[in-house]
Amino acid sequence: MRRLLLFTFILPAVLVCASAAQAKQAGANVNLVAFSTTKPVMQQLITKWTASSAGKGVSFTQSYGPSGSQARAIAAGQPADIALLSNALDVNTLVDAGLVQRDWTKKLPQGGIVANSVVAFVVRPGNPKHIRNWSDLIKPGVQVVTPNPFSSGGAKWNILAAYGAMRKTGQSDKKATGYVTNLFRHVVSQDSSAANAMNTFLAGKGDVLITYESEAYTALAAGRHLGLVIPKQTMLIQLPMVPLEKAPSQAKQFISYCHTPTAQAIFATYGYRPVVKAVLNKPSLAKWKTRFAGGSRLVFQISDPIFGGWRKVNTVWFDPNSGRMVKIEQDVGGPTH
């Protein structure tokens, strides 16, 4: 009888705890703050995950914009549980603000990188200006579109790719920097984000847009009339996705999901190079495996000694007071913030 009474008291308590846990899951909201061009693929991934048993009952608040601006907004207090940014430099902004663990690259899947891309050229149909490589961008009459490096993470990748391409063809630091200055004399628009830069190009401005390879494939999939050129020397773009310190468990679960083969295959269909490379062996992704193969292209990374990592790059190139880009923008009459 005593055991029966004990069971009678315990069972309701267990049911109450289980109901409370289910209610907490059902009412969970995750704030995703991401850079502009990831909106299509993230909306697809969120739809897939919230339809699964793991994500059932979880809702998302989504914000998309220029990566640098997004990072600064989070640091200033914008609600965020997950930050999907275009480079580790912008994650460093959150680390320095005490919002992301300093050792995030060691604690997250794939070193915190959720997908890759490379720097590419988008050209007019038929490529009437015959743009194939970086040297073609500074030919007389060529007009270039690239975002503002003080707001856009994609713009930073573009600048470093241009500089790195010159260094990899044997040019000195001084000459490679001079090339970047010359390149910006051909720039006719510097929008706040890579997505806005694409819209400007599609509206008819410029002969070539420097952007993410993935952004070009997204535009092509939407039926836009353009050409895609991957230069012989280009840069690997590594895209970090990190949880904020006080993020709910569902945010971390979603990040884990984004690294699964299922999610990585979805990234590939949107033109991103998966960090779980084995998914490209799926027959359904055969065309993407061929596209990403790269042939004889030289793809260099931010860890290359010519860059020295994001902390050094930020000081040399993007410091708002003394960086090279402030001087270059002043020289060409471009934005300085």
Image (cartoon, rainbow, N blue to C red):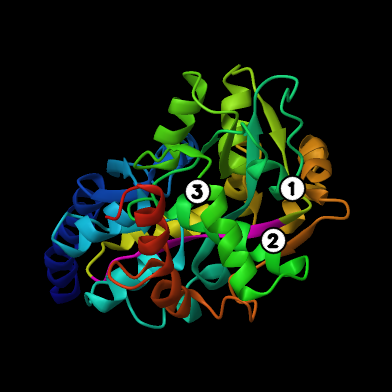
Which kind of residue does numbered mark 3 sit on?
Phe
321 or 202: nearer the eye? 321
- Write the residue at 44% across / 69% down: 317
Task: Pick whichever of labels 2 and 1 is earlier in the sequence.
Answer: 2
Q: Which residue is farthest right? A: 296
* Left or right for 258, reference 172: left
Task: Magenta stretch: give its range.
Answer: 234-245
Contact, mark 1 vs mark 3 (Cβ under 8 Å) = no
Give how far across and how far down residue 321 sits, in percent: 28, 70
* Left or right for 219, reference 336: right
Task: Pick whichever of labels 1 and 3 is earlier in the sequence.
Answer: 3
Query: Residue 231 has which mark?
Result: 1
Q: How many marks?
A: 3
Determine the CA span between mark 2 and mark 1: 9 Å
Task: Pick whichever of labels 2 and 3 is earlier in the sequence.
Answer: 2
Residue at label 3? 184
Determine the CA span between mark 1 and mark 3: 18 Å
Q: For numbered disc 1, what is the local secondary structure?
A: loop
Contact, mark 2 vs mark 1 (Cβ under 8 Å) = yes
Give how far across and how far down residue 30 sits, in percent: 27, 50
Q: For numbered disc 3, what is the local secondary structure?
A: helix
- Write the residue at 61% across / 31% down: 141
Q: Is 104 above or below relative to 198?
A: below
Which kind of residue does numbered mark 2 sit on?
Ala
User: How would you rate the neighbour count of disc 3 (Cα within 10 Å): few for under 14, some for 14-19, many for 20 or more?
Assistant: many
Q: Is 98 above or below relative to 129?
A: below
Q: Quadrant of the C terminus?
A: bottom left
Give how far across and how far down residue 242 sits, in percent: 39, 64
- Write the residue at 81% across / 36% down: 287
Residue at label 2? 165
Give how far across and how far down residue 167 sits, in percent: 69, 69
* Left or right for 276, reference 19: right
